[in-house]
Image (cartoon, rainbow, N blue to C red):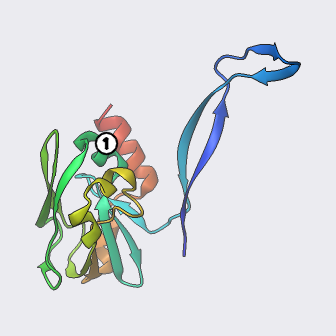
Amino acid sequence: MFSSKVIGITKITRCTWTNMNNVQMLLTNSMRFSTSSIKDRYYTDKHEWIDVNNKIGTVGISHYAQDALGDVVYAELPAVGTEVKIKDECGALESVKAASELYSPVSGKVVEINSLVETKPALINQSCYKDGWLFKLELSSEEEISNLMNEEQYGEFIKQDHS
């Protein structure tokens, strides 16, 4: 199984040497960025993602989407057993800023929901790719994945359409 990793990178934007009690200190600004070795996470143009493992897809919303929504205060998820088609509306999220529909990235049958998100929707903001996933689908057609963007394509999509 592949995993996503966040690593820290130090970007030196201002370098100042000071001497405090004979200790040399380098003051830096740091930034974080995400690298991912997940080869099976795909994205829609509506900012849902799906991570596929053995015909089961875990669905959530992207970091970009949760950031745009703001603090999520309510999650309405599809019921287990619900059959959905690609691009079907299947739930909703409400935040302090807006409400947003959820769309299924592929066709399939809902086999599990993240009930923690229903009781603690802030998990979506805190950990949209790990603890804040929304539901799992048994895929009807793995071929539909080819219509979605991989992580690199999604990054370019955000840069081009949402800068």
Q: Residue 74 appears in which quarter of the rendering? A: bottom left
| Residue density around tag 1, few if under 14, some if 14–19, many if 20 or more, within 10 Å | some
Return the x and y of residue 75 as percentages of the image width and height: 17, 60
- Taking the spot 34% from the left edge, 36% from the top edge, the residue there is 160
In this view, which residue lies farthest toward the right?
22
Whole-percent x, y for residue 135 in the image: 26, 72
Image coordinates of residue 120 in percent, x first then y, are 26, 60
Q: Quadrant of the C terminus?
A: top left
Inspect the image, locate mark 1, and give the three-letter code of the amino acid beneath it. Answer: Asp
Query: What residue sits 28% from the left and 81% below the top?
Result: 139
> Regarding mark 1 in the picture, which secondary structure is present there?
helix
Is 28 displayed left or right of 56 in the figure?
right
**Quarter containing the N terminus:** bottom right
Residue 80: image x %, image y %? Answer: 18, 82
Q: Is residue 110 above or below residue 124?
A: below
Q: Which residue is mark 1?
A: 67
Q: Residue 39 or 62: which is nearer the viewer?
A: 62
Front-most of 129 and 117? 117
Residue 134, above or below 160: below
